[in-house]
Amino acid sequence: MKLEIIGLAVGLALGFACPWTVPANLSLYMAAGLLAALDSALGGARARLKGQFKLGIFLSGAIGNAAIAVFLTWLGEKMGIPLYLAAVVVFGTRLFQNFAEIRRELLTAGPKRDRI
């Protein structure tokens, strides 16, 4: 758990020290990619809490999710259809599901240990 906190602190420090803006024409790609990254991060945290984390699965999911999100955004722009919304809906739903499972795991971890 210490490593995650250190990584978060370093990332926040770099973000504040090196501000960067996203060009308007890439904002949809960034939004879809950010949701994919958040989904992967919460999925990895959930798997770690359950003792099921595997780096290969995490990395392939993160890269695959981001690729699909960017592809849908690109394809939608070419067709004139907001296909990025499909990625937003799917990843948004998964974010809430992962958060609910993490919350449930954290709230029931103590009582489970007490019964064993």
Image (cartoon, rainbow, N blue to C red):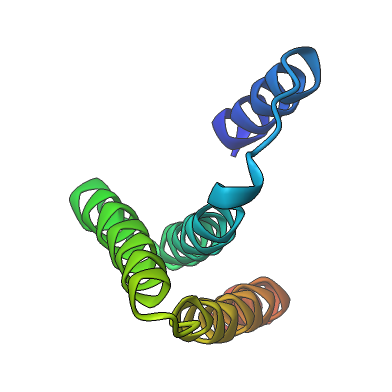
Q: Quadrant of residue 71?
A: bottom left
62 and 29: which one is in front? 29
Give the left or right position of residue 24, taking residue 40 as reference: right
Q: Quadrant of residue 100?
A: bottom right
User: Residue 68, image x and y in percent?
Assistant: 29, 67
Q: Is residue 75 above or below residue 104?
A: above
User: Residue 18, image x and y in percent?
Assistant: 72, 15
Q: Looking at the image, which residue is at 59% across and 79% down?
A: 92
Q: In this view, does 58 lie above or below 115?
A: above
Q: Looking at the image, which residue is at 44% across and 68% down?
A: 50
User: Residue 32, image x and y in percent?
Assistant: 51, 63
Image quarter where the N terminus lies is: top right
93 and 116: which one is in front? 93
Residue found farthest to the right: 16
Give the left or right position of residue 60, taking residue 84 as reference: left
Q: Is residue 35 above or below residue 90?
A: above
Q: Looking at the image, which residue is at 61% across and 53% down?
A: 27
